[in-house]
Each structure stands twice: as C-alpha cells, then as structure tokens.
Image: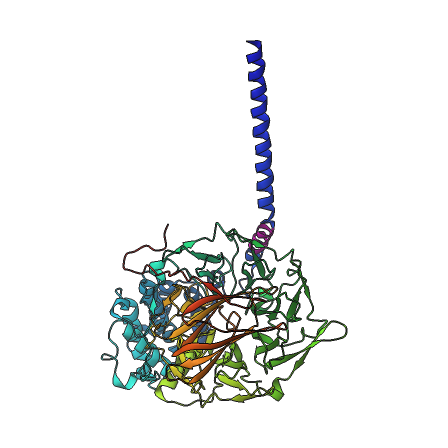
Amino acid sequence: MMRNFYWGVAMVWFLFFSCQEKRTEKSETESQFDKRFEGNRKMVDLLDSLNTAANFQTNYYLSGKRAEFLLKNKPQFKTANEAITWYVKYAFELLNSGNAVGSIEVLENFLKEFQGSDADKIVIPQFKSVYELLAVAYLRKGEDDNCISNHNDESCIVPLSKNAIHVKKKGSQEAIRYYQMLLDVYPDDVQSKWLLNIAAMTLGEYPNKVPLKHRIDFGARDTRIIDFQPLRNVAKGLGVDVKGLSGAGIIEDFNGDGFMDIFASSYGINDNVTLFLSNGKGGFINATESAQLKGITGGLNAKQADFNNDGFIDILLLRGAWLDKGGEWPNSLLRNNGDGTFSDVTFDAGMAHSFYPTETATWADVNNDGWVDVFIANENNPNNDHPCELFINNGDGTFTDKAKEWHMDGNFGYAKAANFADFNNDGWMDLFLGCLGQPNYLFMNRGKQQNGAIRFENIAEKAGVTQPIMSFPAIVVDFNHDGYPDILSTSFPLDRLDYVAQDVGEELLGISNKLEKTKLFLNQGNETFRDVSKTWGIDKMIFAMGLNAGDLNNDGWIDFYAGTGAFAFTTLVPNRIFINNQGKGFYEVTTSSGMGHLQKGHGIGFGDIDNDGDQDVYITMGGAVEGDDAHNCLFVNPNSNNNWIRIKFSGKENLNAIGARVRVSGFNSLGEVQTFYHTVGDGGTFGSNSLEIEMGLGTLDQIDELRVDWPGRGSQIFKSVKINSAYECREGLSELQKLKLKRNPLKIAEGEAACCE
C-alpha cells in the first residue's frame, strides 16, 4: 500500500513538472512568436500617435474636422461675396468629408436666403460657384445612394449597363436640373456638359434624353476594328471589393502555394491594409488579421520584393504623399515570415530614421551583389527638404542609405515616378525619375568605382526624356520588342485638377488645347530616345494616377491601363485602356473593354488569378478625401485564345531575378520568326504585377529558344520549351523545371459566396 502511495505521489510530481515544462516551452514559444511582431506593435503605436496629432489645417484628408472648425468660427459677412466664399468653402469640406446631404442643405439654404425666389429658375453669375458645387453634391449623393452604398460588379463602368442604373434617382435628377440651369447661362461649359451626360447615363437616359447640343459621344475615341473581348469585374462576388481611398494594388503569390494573392492599401490614415489569400478553390480569404497586419494603416502605394532572399515576397508600404510636412510619416517594410504572417521590420532594417512624404519606390540590385536594393523617391519642394533615399541591402536584413554618398539625394523636386531598368543593356540597373513640375531624370548606372561606390550619371537632356514637365506615373517596358526598355510618362497638370472632366470632354468633342500630353519615348539603343507619342496615338491628356502595363490579349505586345482622376469630385472620367498594335501604336478600348470605371483609379496589378494563361487585373479605387471612397475591382480576362508562357525564377541570389531580361524567339503559324522580350519586375509606378512573368506569345506555336540574362551574372539559353506551359527557371541549371499550373476557376456565379470559408 505504501509503495502504491509513494508511486502515486511520484506520478503527481512527474505530471506537475511535465506540465510546467510544457508550459515553459509554450511560454518560450509564445515569447518568441510575440518578439517577431514587436516591430508591428511599435509601428501601430507610432501610427496611432501620428494620426492623433495630424493637423486638420494642413492634412486635406481631414475635411470633417475642417468643416467643424469653419462652422464654429463662422464670421459676420459684410458683403455677398464674403458670404459666397465662406458657404462654398464650408459646403466643399462637408462634401469632401462624405456628407453630401449636408452640403446640399447648406447651399440650397444659402441660395434661398441670398437669391430668393429665383434660386430654382436662373443662375446669377455671382452665384455660379454655388450652383456648380450644388450640382456636384447632388451627383455625389446619387453615387453614394447607389453605386457606393449599394454597389454591384457593374456599378460605375462606362457605358453603364442596366444593372448599373441608379435605383434611387433623386441625386442624378437634381444634378441634371442644376447642370441644365448652368448651361442655359454658360452654353460652352464643357465640364457641365460632361457631368450632365454622366448624370443622364446613371438614369438610363443617355444619349436619347440629353439635348443634342450638350451630348458627348463617350465611345468616340474607342477603336472598333480590334478584336478584344471585354473583361468582367468580379470583385464583389469574390469578396475582394474592399472599399477605401486610393492606394496600392499588388497581385503576387505571397505564400508560395501556386495561386495569386492580392494586397491592397488605402490612403486614409486610419484605413487598414488588406491581404487576400487565394483559397485555391476559386475564392479568397481575408487574411489581414491572421497575417498580423491589423493596425498597419495608410499607404498610397506599395512595392514588393524578396529583400532577404528567403523565398517569400516582402512588401514596402509608402506613406505621406502630397502632404509635405504633414506627410512626414514612416514607411513600413513588411517581412514575409513564410508562415502566413508579416513582421514590420522597418526599425530593425534601418529604414525608419527619416520621415519623408512619398508614394513611389523601385527595387533592383543596384550594385550587383545579389541582394535587391530600393530607391525611395521623396517629395521635395522649396519649403521642405525631403531628400530621396537609396537603401543598399547589407545582406543581413538591414539597409544602409547611400543616397548622399553616391549623389542620389539631390533636390529632384516633387518626385512621383521611379523605375529601375537596364536602359543600355550593360548589366547595371539604371533609374528613370519622373518629377512633377520640373524636367525628368535618367540616371545611368556607370558601375562600381574603385572606392566601391556606384556612379550615376544624369543623361535625361541628352537622351531626350526630360518631358513631360508635369510627370506623374510612368511605365518602363519594351513596347516595340527591340530588346531595349522604353519610357511612357503621363502628364498631370496641377492647375487643371478641378477641370479634368472639361479637358477629357474637349478631347472627345475635338476641341484642341495646349495642355502637356502623355509622352512615349522609344529607346534607340545608344542612350537616346525618340518621341513617338503622336504616331503611336497616345498624345492625350490621360490624367493618370495609377498606371501599369501587361498583355491583356496575349498577343505578345505590352498594353497599358491608366487609373485616372484628380482630387475634385467633378473628376468623373473613366479609367483608360490602350492595346498595343504590334509595336506600331495603341488602340484605345476604354468603353469596349469593360474596364472604364468612373471612380478614381490608383494602384493596378496584373496577374493570372485563375491560372488560365492570361492576365487578370486588380485596381484600387477611390480619391484622396474622406468622402471619396469606392470599391476596388478585379477584372477577369476572357482573352485567352493566344498562346503564352509563364516563368517563375529561382536565382542563387536575387531569388526573383528582378531586372533579368527574358528573350523568347520562335515561329508563328505562318512560319515567320518572332521575338518577344520581357524584363522581370513589378510593373509601373503605381501598381505591382507578379514577379512571375506571364508572357503572351500571340500565334507563336513553336519556341526555338528562350534566353535569360541575369542582371550582372551572365546568361542561360534553353531549348525544347513548350508553349502554354509554366516553368521554373533556376539559375545555373541547364534545363527549365516544368511546373504544374493548378487551374483556379473563379466562383463568380450569382449568389455564390466564394469569399468565405
């Protein structure tokens, strides 16, 4: 019995200590787990404090607080003009804050008080600004009541289908009434004509009920001879239609399961980033919280790369754009841990010492050491010095800013576009820098000097790429397949941002203007470029914010998609789509593509979401003020008739082969030799494509040779490559590794909740 007693005591103690040991092990594991996210908590705390301290007088995002301040400090008016100025300003801030109804009430009460019984009959010139804002407020009320609050996948896409017609009609009806009153007095007001046509379209009254003298043909610029099937927005049915302000859009396989995922941000300072992981069954899972990204807010743009060469794609989130000193916020370097989580390592990586406003950055291996570096283009102005940064990767998870030492921190102005590319094919990554309000830069990388520094030489003027002076986003790709990257840069004239609708309307009406247009520079292969904007048919005022390139019809030629817009609510112009005519020019297919969304477009990602061999498109929508939010779109591509090839890269270093050039040559169905080029990278200035390249091959039905030029590391040539196949290219191996591309047909049938698990 005593033996049993002691045996029982021994077992109790054994179990106790075993439990304690396990508890200790668990606690240590939890501690280690928590330690990985110390940077996340530190960044969230910092963002919270900055949000709290944000000055509503200088941060235009905080319209609601400005409206409260104006009302609290309403003055006594000595003249009618003083009253007009104050009421318009107050109503404007109410509208920007998302209170269209309040804005309408303020303006209509003002007109009754100061104009009396004639307020609903005629526009007195003195009150023109009041009527213009009132019409816009009603137009926005119509949007809020219908395509924003009760949207579907067809909402706001020009030409509006029957499913996009407003059910709640008052907003658009009143907008039409006020625009007709304005046009009675100002018959040549193209902006009012444009918005009148938009309002009529939302009611299903376009074009028949629009007076002929005010009618605008929205499809006038579309090329009708091209065979291009429209894409379909399926974002709502898939649950990826997150609503917010303008932000980043990335398509990438973040967890390495062979399916493309989506990362999106929003410009709003309190708006959380969102991570959607593909479930491999035609739907998506919102993994934001499980990925430890809760509280990671803001960010007008984001660019991805595997900075630590661990095989998992990381993200750099960029903050503070347009806000000058009010935008002195930290960026976030989000390390992909490979287990579905991300750690904010900004502080540990040495990238948090500067708080500069920015919205653009670009990754590449600048010094050819096998580790990708990043150039961050910050916004300078005469009053605030925010030098650009060139973070060189130390290979141990940290970076060193070499911009000053390598003379890349100069006053480059209001930098808005940054694109690394090897423009002269010498194996060193060069940099195109677009600057809003001054000539652009083209920095040629002249290689490593005796002291180990990289020397950059600005040749923009000699190369002929200083324009447009009002550059905003840019794309650097080989548009004509001559083996050299070209430059497409759009113009964004700041003095026209309240009149975007007018300028776009004038283009459709054939009214010429002297505004600076989009520029396309073809690389001549000798460090000079040729302006072909007019001959290629894109010398247009596109007003792009988002801009990215891909091959939408798999014909082998690179197309581009522009997310258009500006800050004002009057900017109701469709995003624009241009199809490459085999290196001879561009066809515009804005209204026929199914992608001409009227809300403001920003970050654009191209990628094969459903693994069917063609590129789909994700775009973040919305403006830059509190009330200008909109739902993001995912356009699924039916243009899969042409041939294609998909390649994933595994370098010995620079694992994703950023900057590598791929050359595919072979024979088409007519026996003709064709050659296509593609450079590995994330795409344009605003938006990020998958680092797996997806190349359309058109009618190429036999690949003779596939060549990969690794940046600074020699070349590989492969034979016996099959079309319509996926491969992994491993640096140093003599053969491509065939990959099984798992189809992922999207569950987009009506009523099917593909988003949920």
Q: Position of residue 645 (x, y in %)?
A: 44, 71
- x, y (%) of residue 727? 47, 66
Which residue occupies the foreground of this view, 504 or 654? 654
180 shown above or below 42: below
Residue shown at the point (38%, 65%) measured from the top left: 633
Q: Residue sitting at 44 percent across and 57 percent down? A: 276
Count how many numbered circles sit on residues in the image. 0
Q: Is residue 42 magenta?
A: yes
Q: Position of residue 671 (x, y in %)?
A: 40, 84
Whether 606 is among the magenta residues is: no
Q: Which image quadrant for residue 219?
A: bottom left
Q: Quadrant of residue 615?
A: bottom left
For image coordinates 74% across by 75% down, the residue present is: 449
Decide if residue 91 is in sight here. no
Magenta segment range? 39-48
**Foreground: 124 or 589?**
589
Q: Is residue 382 left or right of residue 172?
A: right
Q: Is residue 262 above or below residue 713?
A: above
Q: Position of residue 20 (x, y in %)?
A: 59, 30
The single residue placed furthest to the top in the displayed view is 1
Question: Does residue 740 lie above or below 10 as drawn?
Answer: below
Q: Quadrant of the N terminus?
A: top right
Q: Nearer the viewer, residue 37 or 427?
A: 427
Identity of the residue furthest to the left in this view: 208
